[in-house]
Amino acid sequence: MEWFEERLETAEGRTVRIGVTAKRACVRSPYQTIEVFDTVSFGRMLVHDGVIMATERDEAHYHEMIVHVPLAVHPAPRRVLVIGGGDGGTVREVCRHAGVEEIDLCEIDEQVVTVCREYFPGLTGGFADPRVALHFADGAKWVAEHPGYYDVILVDSSDPIGPAEVLFRREFFASLHGALREDGIAVTQSESFHYHERIIGQISRFGREIFPVYRYYYTLIPTYPSGVIGFSFLSKRFDPLRDGDPGRLPFLADLKYYTPEIHRAAFVLPAFTRAFLPD
Amino acid sequence: MEWFEERLETAEGRTVRIGVTAKRACVRSPYQTIEVFDTVSFGRMLVHDGVIMATERDEAHYHEMIVHVPLAVHPAPRRVLVIGGGDGGTVREVCRHAGVEEIDLCEIDEQVVTVCREYFPGLTGGFADPRVALHFADGAKWVAEHPGYYDVILVDSSDPIGPAEVLFRREFFASLHGALREDGIAVTQSESFHYHERIIGQISRFGREIFPVYRYYYTLIPTYPSGVIGFSFLSKRFDPLRDGDPGRLPFLADLKYYTPEIHRAAFVLPAFTRAFLPD
């Protein structure tokens, strides 16, 4: 068996190896190297600059949780922006919400969309939805240019190394606030509480300074280095521990990970996180 | 950097590698090979037959959750049995409960205790507690020979390959029932819902046939192959979703993982587990 090995700077001293049967694609874009593998146990796998982004087996754990948590809390989301997310999984989940009227995807790297359309049809189906518009542009600039426009913004980024680094800065969180309507919600990929105390501590400070409501929640991804990935829930009005009705979503029976009970449990964090994520 | 690599049969096509700085011990007991490493990021690490059992950095996530969940649900646990658990972490956590009067450890492999006393003083401190008695014996036989004796039994076993295989059989679950008092609770290590559908399905069937209350819960261990390990909660009377008062534990401020909120959230499982763990 051949092995793909991931070595993340942020997970020094621990790596994940995935058995692979074939390498399907290797594309060098202006921003990163994009690779596609077939694996022994996880279906097809997408890799950016040597880091696992998604596998067919567990991608729904991530995409359902970045989308349905904020869209169940917001009572009437009509305009949704996805930043990053060129693999299509986040857009696919947003499309399940019938009340959403406009879905903008702002992905800096067009090659990600091109590669995923070819190799991940199970993720990219939402791109054909008439509500979806693709924009190959800088996400930080896009939000600065759309003040007060969106109900929900989902930042489906890679790690803060390479093209996504700017999406972890204070300035970007302030721009998110500016691009949201008066009761808007943003969710950003925010690393793992097992390994990334420093960066989560920073993000949560920015988040609390800029938004009235800051919460951290997580999902479980066995192919990520710690098995956990978290999200920042940034909100101008609605609190996920008080508002919203996850039980109203009509497509719950079609989901692999999200349930109304998981929606609430995902905000409950282990004791050790209090050191860098105080209540 | 040198690497330790784990290859589990049950996680085919995915392995974990941990950077190590020194190998401290390698002991071949009659039951298994026991190794101790110093690691780059996880402190000291215990390995049985090539499988990671515990690291200093995340062992509390496991030991607190196998112990405090049942001991917070049982209103007055006095006699506690630990099967396996020769590293001492489970006994250490049981010792925090002042009301417990007798703590029996039944570990088949005395060499595990000998090695851990030398290399893991942070785990084995509980062995000096006067309430603790060590028995180097077969756990399945021990429970069969102690009918109606224990309030709580904790099965802190390795995977169902090698010496622990018998601890995953129906007969053993029936023996657990027999060794418990009329309102007793048993908790058994029950693998990961990401990878072990078949074995979890089996255990949960045995559990439901034999005990009035069966629940599955989990904890997060970044050094395990999927980042998740689960437990079966087997109970003659008390239901962890209804009974007990986790908030009453006087040592909550000293814990790294367990909180009263985590106690409840740990029973909330992703949607895909319904296929093999129905409500």
Image: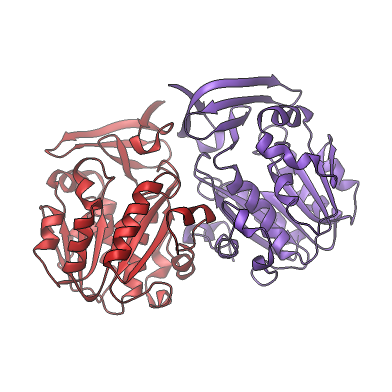
Chain colours: A red, B purple
- Give the residue displayed 37% in from the left and 36% down from the top: A39
Which quadrant would the N terminus of chain A be assigned to in this image? top left
Q: Residue at x 47, y 65 (%)?
A: A262
Left or right side of A173 for A249: right
Using the rendered image of the protein, determine whether residue A190 is visible from the camera's viewpoint.
Answer: no
Residue at x-position 75% and y-position 66%: B212
Quadrant in the picture for residue B168: top right
Quarter-wise, where is residue A149 in the image? bottom left
Of the pair A111 and A9, the residue shown nearer to us: A9
Residue A39 lies left or right of residue A141; in this view the side is right
B102 to A279, vertically: above or below: above
> How many labels, in total?
0
Quarter of image, res B169: top right
Can residue B137 be spotted in the picture?
Answer: yes
- Towards the viewer: A8 or B227: A8
Q: Position of residue A52 (x, y in %)?
A: 33, 40
Which residue does the image show at 60% across and 42% down from the upper left? B59
Quick check: B207 left or right of A274? right
**Picture coordinates of residue A126, whole percent (x, y):** 22, 60
Q: Quadrant of the C terminus of chain A?
A: bottom left
Query: Vertical placement of B16 versus A125: above or below?
Result: above
- Residue B155: x and y, percent? 73, 47
Seen in the picture, residue B189 relative to B237 is either above or below; the reply is above
> Residue A192 or A113: which is nearer the viewer?
A192
